Image: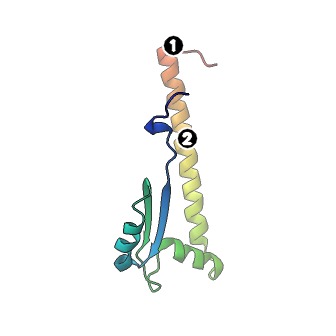
Amino acid sequence: MAERNALDKPRLSALVVAHNEEAQLADCLATLQFADELVVVLFLASTEQHTVPRRMWSGIRELISPTITAAATLLIILSIMLMTVMELLRRRGERLRGITPS
């Protein structure tokens, strides 16, 4: 049998999710030294802070407002326009280079 190289070795990943736990994070990471990869997700917000997604969610659930619908509609229209422009540019580039569509 051929020897396994370092790329074939299974890797161990650890995920740490912390909410306002900066003081204990160093101890937690010290205990995870055996892991090959660490992913740390920090939530540094208090319950009094209102982020945009949180406001949107409360607006959807409590206040029926056309603002969210208008913003979503604009984002959809913008996305469709960008995809159309990209497709037109791709076709134009193929035509200029003489590539026939398959």
Residue 58 vertical position relative to residue 84 in the rendered view, above or below:
below
In the image, residue 38 lies at what x, y percent? Answer: 43, 59
The residue under label 1 is 98
Q: Earlier in the sequence, mark 1 or mark 2?
A: 2
For the C terminus, give its image quadrant.
Answer: top right
Residue 30 at x, y percent in the picture = 37, 67
Q: Against 93, is 29 above or below?
A: below
In the picture as drawn, the residue positioned furthest to the bottom comes out as 48
Q: Nearer the viewer, residue 5 or 28?
A: 5
Circle 2 is placed at which residue position?
83
Q: Is residue 11 left or right of residue 80?
A: left
Q: Nearer the viewer, residue 3 or 97?
A: 3
Query: In the image, what residue type sits under mark 1?
Result: Gly
Q: Secondary structure at mark 2?
A: helix
* Residue at figure coordinates x 49%, y 63% from the top left: 15
| In the image, residue 34 above or below residue 42 | above
**Percent x, y of residue 90:** 51, 28
| In this picture, residue 62 sits left or right of residue 85 | right
Q: Nearer the viewer, residue 92 or 10?
A: 10
